[in-house]
Amino acid sequence: MTTPFHDTLSAHGLELTREVTRTLQINVGRLCDLACRHCHLDAGPGRREIMTPATMAAVIAFATRHRFAVIDITGGAPELVPGIEELLRELAPVTGQLMLRTNLTALMAPEQAELLELIIDLKVTLVASFPSTNARQADAQRGAGISDRSVTMLQQLNARGYGQPDSGLLLHLVANPGGAFLPDDQAAAERRFKQEAQRRFGIVFNQLFTFANMPLGRFRSWLEKSGNEADYLQRLQAAFNPCTVAGLMCRSLLSVDWDGRLYDCDFNLAAELPLGNKPQTIFDQTAPPPAGTTIATGEHCYACTAGSGFT
Amino acid sequence: MSDYYNPADLNKFAEIGKDAPELATKFFDYYSAVFAEGELTAREKALIALGVAHAVQCPYCIDAYTRSCLEKGSHLGEMTEAVHVANAIRGGASLVHGIQMRNVADKLGM
C-alpha cells in the first residue's frame, strides 16, 4: 500500500501547482499498430478512439489563440490517424517546436511516404520509442521483430538528415525499462546508447530520454499478472526525490485527449484524472489554466518523481 | 529458524550497523564509493558485481545486482556472459590446482 502522493508532497512541505503553460500535448487517439507491454494507455490495433476533424479544429483554434512554445503530438500511433497531415500543417506555424511521438513502425509503411515528406518539410521534431539496442530486450517489450524494423526506420531517418548535426531535424529517442525496474541515469544511458547505436547500426540521434514505466494501462495489468505490482509501487515510492517536483512536466503542460477532454498530463489522462480535478474540454476553454492552479495527482505520480524524475 | 535465506532480509542490510555503527558506516561509505562512476562505469561495476555474486554464491547479491544490471541498461546476454566469466574463473581455479596434484603425484610416484 503506497502513501497517497499528496501526503508525501505535504510531508516534504511541497505543493504541486501549475506554472505558466508552455507545452500543449495532443493525444490523437489510442489506435496503434503495436501493443507494447509497457503502454500506459493500452493502445493497440483494436482501439478505435481517434480524434475527429471537429476536435482537431478546436485544438488548432486553441493553439492559435495561445501560442505554445512546444506542441507535442502523441498517441497511440499518431501517423495512423486520418487528418494528421492537416493537424501538423496547421500547428507548425503557431509553435516554436512541433514534436511528434513515433513508434517508428507506423511511420515506415509505404503509404506514409507523403507524411514523412511533410514531417521533414515542417522540421517536426521526432521522438521515437527505442527501449534497447539489444533486439531481444526491445522485442520483449514491443513485439517480435519490432527492433529490427525500428533500426531500419532510424537508418532511413538518418539518411534524410534526422539526428544529423546542423540539419535542423531533431531525432530524440525514448527508452523505457523492459520490466518492473527503474530506468538508468539519463546521461549515462545516452552515452551508452549513442556509442552502441553508432557501433551496431550506424545510427545517430540527438538526445535520449529515460522514463520509468507508469503503473497504468497495459503495464499495470502486466505488473498485476506477473506478481510485481506491490514491489514496483513500493520501489517508486521509495525512490521519491523531492528535488524533482519543481521541474515536473505537468507544471507547464496541458494535455488534450482525442475527445477534447483536458488533463494535467498524459498519465493523468490515462488514469482519467481530469485537469485540476474538474472535468473540462478544449471546447469550453479559451486559455490554459492560470499559474497556481492545483494539479490532480495519483499513485502513478511516483513514477515521475523517482530518482532523477520525469521533467 | 525456518530459513537461512529470506529475501526480505536484503532490505534490512543496514541493521548490521546496530551494534557496531562505526564499522558499518565505514563499510557502507566505502561500498558507495566503490560503486560510484569512476574509471569504470556504474554499469560495468554492476556487471562485475553480478559475476562475483555468482562466484561467492550470495543469493542477496544475485537478487540486488540482477536488478541493478537491468536498471543500468544491461541485457540478459551481457549478464549471462558475466556469470560465465565468474564460472570460468571458479572452474579454472579448481582445474589449475590439478597442476599441484600432478606435482605431488610426480614427486611421490616412480
Image: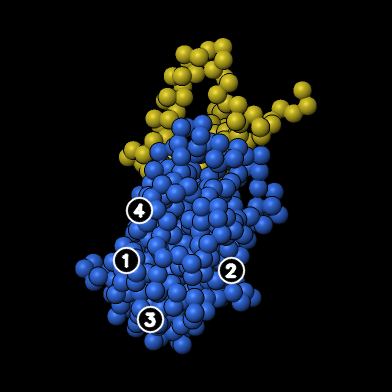
Tint of chain B: yellow
- Residue under label 2, please give it: A43
Q: Amino acid at mark 4?
A: Val
Q: Residue type at mark 3?
A: Leu
In which quadrant will I find the N terminus of chain A?
Answer: top right
Q: Circle 3 — which element?
A: helix
Disc nearer the start of the sequence (1/3): 1
- In the rendered view, tell whether residue A124 sits above or below residue A227: below
Place of residue A252 in the rendered image (x, y in percent of width and height, measured from the top left): 39, 54
Residue indicated by mark 1: A67
For the point 59% across and 74% down, the residue is: A49
Circles 4 and 2: CB atoms closer than 8 Å:
no
Residue at point 40% right, 70% down?
A: A62
Q: Residue type at mark 1: give it.
A: Arg
Please give the label number shown on residue A116: 3
Query: Mark 1 and mark 2 in contact (Cβ < 8 Å)?
Result: no
**Horizontal placement of A37 versus A157: left or right?**
right
Specify which label sits upstream in the sequence, 2 or 1. 2
**Cβ–Cβ below 8 Å for labels 4 and 3?**
no
Asked if marks 4 and 3 fall on the same chain, the answer is: yes
Q: State which chain is coloured blue.
A: A
Q: Position of residue B19 (x, y in %)?
A: 56, 12
Asked where in the image residue A232 lies, by quadrant, the reply is top right
Closer to the chain start, of discs 4 and 3, is 4
Tell me the chain of label 3.
A
Mark 1 closeness class: few <14, some 14–19, many ≥20 residues within 10 Å? some
Mark 4 on the same chain as mark 2: yes
Q: Nearer the viewer, residue A47 or B101?
A: A47
Amino acid type assigned to the residue bearing label 2 in the image: Ala
The chain ID associated with circle 4 is A
Depth check: give the residue in front, A222 or A131: A222
Give the vertical position of B89 relative to B8 (above or below).
below
